[in-house]
Amino acid sequence: MNPDVILPPQVAWASGVFANAPLIRKTTRLADLPDFFSDNNAWRGCDPQQRLYDVETIDSPSGEGALYVGVTHLYAGKIGDEFFMTRGHFHQRREQGEVYFGLCGRGLLLLQTASGEARLERVKPGSVHIIPSFTAHRLINTGDETLSALAVWPSVAGHDYAALAGGFALRVFASDHHLQEWEARND
Amino acid sequence: MNPDVILPPQVAWASGVFANAPLIRKTTRLADLPDFFSDNNAWRGCDPQQRLYDVETIDSPSGEGALYVGVTHLYAGKIGDEFFMTRGHFHQRREQGEVYFGLCGRGLLLLQTASGEARLERVKPGSVHIIPSFTAHRLINTGDETLSALAVWPSVAGHDYAALAGGFALRVFASDHHLQEWEARND
């Protein structure tokens, strides 16, 4: 045997930084999301070029059955009293699920069914989020540091943002004492 | 808003141990794999109850598009001169891929196409393995410690062991100096 051994991509668990991987990068800035946060005046008062989140996806084969791997880095901040969050989406192929793993930072994963029922899962280092079929998902950074989450999803899933153009059923604000108390109890 | 926040399952990156998760466990022992290692005499000389590997899978919904999450713990050892390895399989639905992440230990991921072409990827903490469609896969522990790898795969993928009843095209032995030199160079 004379094996050729391949050195695959690497991910740093503590930061979500990829190495040795061909990456596709996408940056979402405040300017990209008008009428998105509840406080429009606060949004207009911010630097439109402020980065909200970056997504890095490993460039890999697509097709039915093929899986993609990527990391979302959602920065810390608020618009008015509302925490920074990702746009969030249903998959175009609604039956396709996804898995998130919390890597660093603290936050929430907002999940919403087609009928509009919303629920929150706590995201922290090592958290495992099995997003079921037919379920929209959005990350919310409730902490002071970048929230980074590793994702695995079917390459055929696609994104449907239009179905949630009116927003999710639930928003998360820094002034929510119920949530703060819950977080203090479960830290 | 009065959010109910869910505490999801947790995985410890350094060990692959799950917490707060309903688990399905499967243990594979030497007795389960006759005519599997190349040295049958050495296999017969071992304790048949010796654990070769354990797989822990989070019990979660199945169905088209749903993803499963699990960890394989492949123990360190050799049968004769051949390293401990998992049985390995094609997916029953050949087009369904899978993703592995190395968590702890050192080893190899053996990949093999339908036409019998084999290749090896180095598994170590943080390694990312995007297993393409139509590709069989097996873990091999080349180190002195348990090799643990996190996996995400489509719940509909299924396992086809029969297609590889005659074995993979490539075996890995401790006496392989080419491999040892490669590992020394890339550690």
Image (tube, coloured by chain):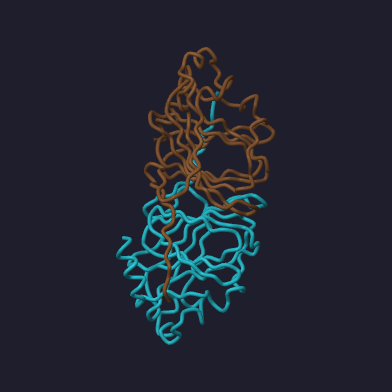
Chain colours: A cyan, B brown
- Residue nearest the viewer, comparing B71 with A11: B71
At 38% from the left and 31% from the top, the residue drawn is: B145
At 43% from the left and 45% from the top, the residue drawn is: B126
Q: How many marks?
A: 0
At 43% from the left and 35% from the top, the residue drawn is: B147
Query: Where B149 falls versus B2 (above or below)?
Result: above
At 41% from the left and 58% from the top, the residue drawn is: B7
Q: Position of residue A75 (x, y in %)?
A: 40, 67
Q: Position of residue A121 (x, y in %)?
A: 44, 62
Q: Position of residue A145 (x, y in %)?
A: 34, 64
Describe residue A35's horizontal placement relative to residue A13 as left or right.
right
Q: Position of residue B90 (x, y in %)?
A: 64, 37
Q: Could you tell me which quadrant the N terminus of chain A lies in?
A: top right
Res A147 → quadrant: bottom left
Query: Where B185 falls versus B19 (above or below)?
Result: above
Q: Could you tell me which quadrant the C terminus of chain A lies in?
A: bottom left
- Residue nearest the viewer, comparing B130 with A178: A178
Query: Where B151 falls versus B39 (above or below)?
Result: below
- Residue nearest the viewer, comparing B72 with B100: B72
Res A77 → quadrant: bottom left
Describe residue A26's horizontal placement relative to residue A91 as left or right.
left
Query: Where A159 falls versus B133 (above or below)?
Result: below
